[in-house]
Image (cartoon, helix red, strand yellow):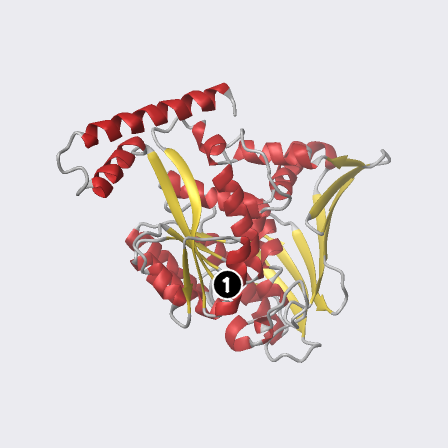
């Protein structure tokens, strides 16, 4: 332990001892001991703010968030101390809920929580707990709307996994509840917190004169079907339209489409061909879409679910005089740049991370783990700390990308280019 931490610990100990001795002079000390000790403790920790977090849904994605929350709890002093706040901020994983008792018990062995809620009403019991400040809603899409509306009414801040809901209209209901009850509502659009996406925007801007016009973006994503109960996605609900609503584009590549929207802005028109090879009704597993942004940039998407044990995202951005290639596999990202006949060069992940954390106003923070989950959870908690109700990742972003996806589906249905008009 450092000298500073030793001094702080001794200071706290002296205050607690002084409070204890003062209380012992009270003739009713024995009768009121518990109350007096709690009052003494409250005085010592009056400048400490705990953000008590509950997780609803203990599936695979919950592990990513629980791990990130644990890291943020352990590093809270470093993260928020620089703000010179009068309060010490500390997020804690406080409660878990799942309708499946075995699942929540198994989850709690790895991520212990003070309170465990089980059974059919587990999620609502967690929401109604007055001790909880924020909830992570990590359940199948069909349940999102009701949980969000109940949590907002209870005054809980909400992190909601994507897709936000079955329709943009339902996302708007969530936005209205956010504004009415003045709570933070952040949708889990991970590319908004992926440092390579932010750095890519910088690269394009810094080199626009040198590289020439951006002519085409080619993107393809291959993922093992996340609905067959395989080890990477042990649940099967994604093959049921009544629970999941749609397939690969809606459930998976929504991230990448949103990432491109975050860089290039509003969409002008879309055209798509969608197929279903696995035979799950309404659950597409092949999408070929062409998206044109209002600034003229064309984005070609090829999205696939298959039986190959191979999860990979690849982007290629072609300019008149240059090319950028991005490969994402096993949570690792590689970005390489090719200019004319010069040798390729790679962008270091550390460089991208440092740029990203500086951009979001937290230059002192270091990426604890690869991938964007840590960063998006950090930004959610920071929105609570700063009372930034709309957060840096607005729920409106979730609504917009779903409107674009609906236009893509409609293009496939009618076999025509759709001039996109957001609702």
Front one among 356 and 375: 375
Residue 31 sits in quarter: top left
Instruction: Look at the image and tell me in which quarter the C terminus lies.
Output: bottom left
What SS does tag 1 mark? helix
Q: Which residue is mark 1?
A: 105
- Left or right: residue 51 versus residue 351 is left
Q: Is residue 76 above or below residue 121?
A: above
Residue pictured at 40% horizontal, 64% vertical: 123
Residue 225 figure quarter = bottom right
Residue 158 x %, y %: 41, 54
x then y, percent, for residue 278: 69, 77
Taking 39 as reference, is 239 left or right? right
Look at the image and tell me whether residue 261 can be seen.
no
Foreground of the two, 225 or 105: 105
Rendered view: 358 above or below 59: above
* Number of marks present in the image shown: 1
Q: Residue at x 62, y 59 (%)?
A: 253
Residue in view at x 60 percent, y 39 percent: 368
Residue 139 screen position, x and y as percent: 49, 65
Q: Is residue 300 left or right of residue 368?
A: right
Front-lying residue, 421 or 76: 76
Query: How many residues crowd mark 1 within 10 Å: few (<14), some (14–19), many (20+)?
Result: some
Residue that appears at 61% across and 32% down: 354
Q: Position of residue 186 (x, y in %)?
A: 45, 51
- Does residue 167 sit above or below 49 in this rendering? below
Q: Nearer the viewer, residue 342 or 171?
A: 171
Q: Is residue 291 visible?
A: yes
């Amino acid at each position: 332990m450092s000298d500073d931490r030793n001094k702080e610990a001794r200071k706290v100990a002296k205050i607690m001892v002084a409070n204890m001795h003062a209380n012992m002079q009270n003739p009713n000390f024995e009768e009121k001991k518990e109350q007096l000790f709690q009052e003494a403790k409250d005085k010592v920790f009056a400048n400490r703010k705990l953000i008590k977090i509950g997780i609803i849904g203990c599936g695979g994605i919950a592990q990513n968030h629980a791990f990130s929350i644990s890291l943020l709890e352990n590093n809270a002093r470093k993260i928020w101390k620089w703000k010179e706040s009068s309060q010490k901020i500390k997020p804690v994983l406080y409660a878990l809920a799942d309708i499946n008792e075995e699942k929540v018990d198994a989850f709690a062995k790895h991520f212990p929580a003070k309170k465990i809620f089980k059974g059919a009403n587990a999620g609502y019991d967690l929401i109604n707990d007055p001790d909880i400040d924020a909830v992570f809603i990590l359940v199948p899409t069909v349940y999102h709307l009701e949980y969000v509306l109940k949590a907002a009414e209870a005054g809980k801040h909400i992190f909601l996994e994507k897709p936000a809901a079955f329709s943009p209209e339902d996302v708007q209901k969530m936005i209205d509840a956010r504004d009415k009850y003045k709570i933070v509502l952040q949708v889990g659009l991970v590319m908004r917190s992926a440092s390579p996406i932010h750095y890519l925007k910088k690269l394009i801007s810094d080199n626009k004169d040198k590289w020439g016009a951006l002519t085409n973006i080619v993107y393809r994503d291959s993922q093992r079907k996340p609905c067959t109960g395989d080890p990477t996605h042990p649940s099967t609900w994604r093959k049921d339209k009544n629970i999941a609503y749609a397939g690969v584009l809606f459930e998976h590549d929504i991230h990448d489409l949103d990432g491109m929207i975050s860089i290039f802005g509003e969409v002008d028109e879309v055209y798509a061909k969608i197929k279903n090879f696995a035979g799950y009704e309404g659950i597409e597993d092949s999408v070929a879409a062409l998206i044109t942004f209002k600034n003229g940039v064309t984005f070609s998407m090829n999205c696939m679910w298959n039986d190959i044990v191979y999860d990979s995202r690849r982007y290629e951005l072609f300019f008149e005089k240059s090319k950028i290639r991005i490969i994402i596999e096993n949570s690792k990202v590689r970005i390489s740049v090719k200019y004319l006949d010069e040798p390729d060069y790679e962008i270091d992940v550390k460089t991208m991370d440092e740029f990203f954390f500086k951009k979001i106003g937290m230059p002192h923070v270091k990426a604890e783990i690869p991938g964007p989950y840590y960063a998006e959870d950090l930004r959610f908690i920071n929105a609570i700390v700063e009372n930034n109700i709309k957060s840096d990742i607005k729920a409106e972003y979730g609504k917009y990308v779903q409107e674009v996806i609906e236009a893509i589906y409609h293009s496939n249905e009618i076999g025509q280019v759709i001039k996109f008009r957001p609702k």
